[in-house]
Image (spheres, rainbow, N blue to C red):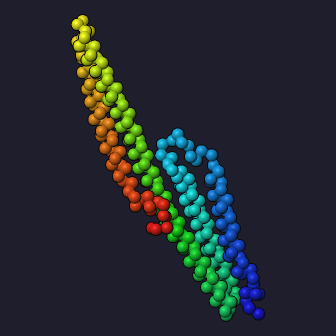
């Protein structure tokens, strides 16, 4: 009688273990997706893919579980092969080798996902920095316009005022004009920094994040 027919559990066990692993990972993924507060629009740099890091984390956990399961299968089959002989022992040793290779592949995939998570973290940091710099530049530009309006107002009042207050208003106008000048310069500096940070996020980085298998 064929060895597979004598031991149907030998072929079913690895499939059952793998199915159980996938089931646990699916449950973990569902729990991660149901956590409250994952995408809060009021926070800076929550991004268009707020769930992406969580998805990578779940995938890494899945790869780790698969590697552990494959090693367990390999160990079991290798132990069974020591008590057999002939073709059945050879087949079990071959299955054990396949399981070890599956564990190694899962480890390699997990390492790729780890690199992807690190690149995503850096990318998210660059996006956050760009937004903060752009916001600060906008605030300073508005401050410069306000200070200039104040300077113009004091200048106009001093021009039409012959009282001793005219000199004081001219001084205030000069101070406001200087503040406006400084704010404009600072806004330009921050705008330049924002543009530089945005340039770091190149198209190929977006592609690498969107296609993690191409590593």
Image: 168 above or below 110: above
- Residue in front for this viewpoint, 131 or 31: 131
Residue sitting at x 30%, y 25%: 148
Q: Which quarter of the figure is the N terminus placed in?
A: bottom right
Rendered location of residue 186, percent (x, y):
30, 36
Residue sitting at x 32%, y 23%: 149
Image: 164 above or below 87: above
Rendered location of residue 130, percent (x, y):
39, 45
Image: 6 above or below 70: below
Rendered location of residue 34, percent (x, y):
65, 51
Residue sitting at x 27%, y 16%: 156
- In-image side of 58 versus 11 (left or right): left
Q: Which quarter of the figure is the C terminus placed in?
A: bottom left
Image: 150 above or below 94: above
Quarter of image, res 11: bottom right
Q: Does residue 203 show up?
A: yes
- Residue in front for this viewpoint, 21 or 141: 141
Q: Number of callouts in the render?
A: 0
Rendered location of residue 202, percent (x, y):
38, 56
Residue sitting at x 38%, y 41%: 134
- Residue in front for this viewpoint, 85 or 123: 123
Q: Does residue 164 show up?
A: no
């Amino acid at each position: 009688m064929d060895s597979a027919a004598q031991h149907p559990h030998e072929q079913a066990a690895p499939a059952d273990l793998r199915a159980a692993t996938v089931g646990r990972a699916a449950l973990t993924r569902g729990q991660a997706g149901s956590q409250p507060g994952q995408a809060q629009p009021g926070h800076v740099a929550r991004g268009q893919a707020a769930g992406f890091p969580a998805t990578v984390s779940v995938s890494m956990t899945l790869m780790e579980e698969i590697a552990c399961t494959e090693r367990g299968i390999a160990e079991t089959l290798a132990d069974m092969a020591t008590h057999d002989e002939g073709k059945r022992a050879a087949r079990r040793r071959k299955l054990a080798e396949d399981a070890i290779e599956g564990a190694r592949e899962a480890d390699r995939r997990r390492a790729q996902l780890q690199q992807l998570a690190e690149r995503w973290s850096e990318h998210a940091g660059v996006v956050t920095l760009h937004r903060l710099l752009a916001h600060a530049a906008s605030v300073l530009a508005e401050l410069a316009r306000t200070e200039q309006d104040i300077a113009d107002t004091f200048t106009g009042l001093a021009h039409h005022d012959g009282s001793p207050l005219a000199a004081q208003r001219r001084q205030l106008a000069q101070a406001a004009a200087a503040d406006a000048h400084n704010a404009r310069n600072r806004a330009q500096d921050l705008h330049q920094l924002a543009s530089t940070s945005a340039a770091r996020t190149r198209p190929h980085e977006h592609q690498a994040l969107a296609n993690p298998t191409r590593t």
